[in-house]
Amino acid sequence: MITLTKLNNKEFTLNAIYIEQVESFPDTTITLTNGKKFVVKETEEDVQVKVLEFYQKINLLGLR
């Protein structure tokens, strides 16, 4: 799970395994595999780092 911030400054956690796409429109929009979208304050690069750290933490990439 990764912690992100909505535009109204409310934090929430998201299971990064279900992320299908991350785009900047200019706000960062995350689309999940079920089609649900979240707009967050973090940059696209910040989300990418958080997802990579999560994948490494759960050993999804085979890296420690």
Image: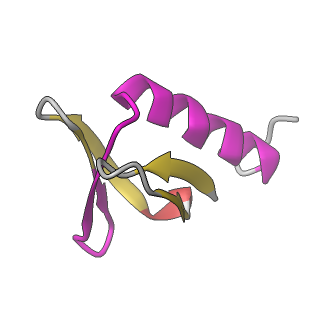
- Which portion, as a residue range, is magenta? 30-59
What's the residue at 35%, 38% (across, down)? Answer: 41
Seen as rendered, the residue at the extreme left is 25
Seen as rendered, the residue at the extreme bottom is 34
Q: Is residue 33 highlighted in magenta? A: yes
Percent position of residue 46, x then y: 48, 28
Query: In the drawing, does residue 35 fall left or right of residue 20?
Result: left
Percent position of residue 42, x then y: 40, 34
Percent position of residue 61, x then y: 70, 43
Query: In the drawing, does residue 46 fall left or right of residue 55?
Result: left
Q: Quadrant of the C terminus?
A: top right
Q: How many marks?
A: 0
Residue 27 in sight in this render: yes
Q: Is residue 32 highlighted in magenta? A: yes
Residue 61 in sight in this render: no
What's the residue at 57%, 42% (across, down)? Answer: 51
Query: In the drawing, does residue 59 fall left or right of residue 2?
Result: right
Percent position of residue 47, x then y: 46, 36
